[in-house]
Image (tube, helix red, strand yellow):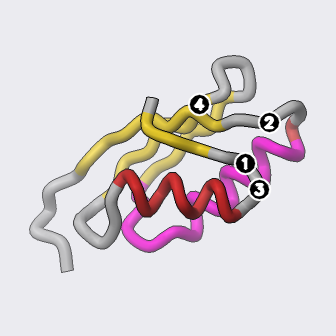
Amino acid sequence: MTDGAENKVTLKVEGMTCGHCVGRVQKALDTAPGVTEAKVDLDSGTAEIRFGAETDAAGLAAIVTEAGYPAHAA
């Protein structure tokens, strides 16, 4: 369980070229453990994520990368 603290990270997501790409990244993040909010932006190629203690920035980047879009902390 989390102690109520929330973390925030912005990931740079490579390879997104259309709305379908955004949807895949969004779905991957929305179903990730601990994610409370995710906003994926095609124009900037980023994902802003709020998450609890169940995960960390590296874990979230790995989830996005596994979905087919290499990601790293911006």
Q: Which residue is mark 3?
A: 68
Q: Check disc 1 and report its element: helix, strand or loop.
A: loop
| Residue 32 belongs to magenta span | yes
- Local packing at callout 2 (Cα closer than 10 Å; few below 14, some 14-19, many 20+) is many
- The amino acid type, in three-letter code, at marker 3 is Gly
Residue 53 image point, x, y percent: 23, 66
Q: Which mark is residue 46?
A: 4
Q: Check disc 2 and report its element: helix, strand or loop.
A: loop
Along the line of sight, the residue nearer the viewer: 69 or 48: 69
The answer to whether the residue labelled 2 contacts the one labelled 1, judged by CB atoms less than 8 Å apart, is yes
Residue extending farthest bottom: 1
- The amino acid type, in three-letter code, at marker 1 is Tyr
| Residue 64 belongs to magenta span | no
Q: Magenta stretch?
A: 20-36
- Local packing at callout 4 (Cα closer than 10 Å; few below 14, some 14-19, many 20+) is many
- The CA span between labels 2 and 3 is 9 Å
Dominant secondary structure, magenta: helix
- The CA span between labels 1 and 3 is 4 Å
Identity of the residue drawn at 37% across and 68% down? 34
The answer to whether the residue labelled 1 contacts the one labelled 3, judged by CB atoms less than 8 Å apart, is yes
- Judge left or right: residue 13 versus residue 74: right
Q: Earlier in the sequence, mark 2 or mark 3?
A: 2
- The amino acid type, in three-letter code, at marker 4 is Thr
The answer to whether the residue labelled 2 contacts the one labelled 4, judged by CB atoms less than 8 Å apart, is no
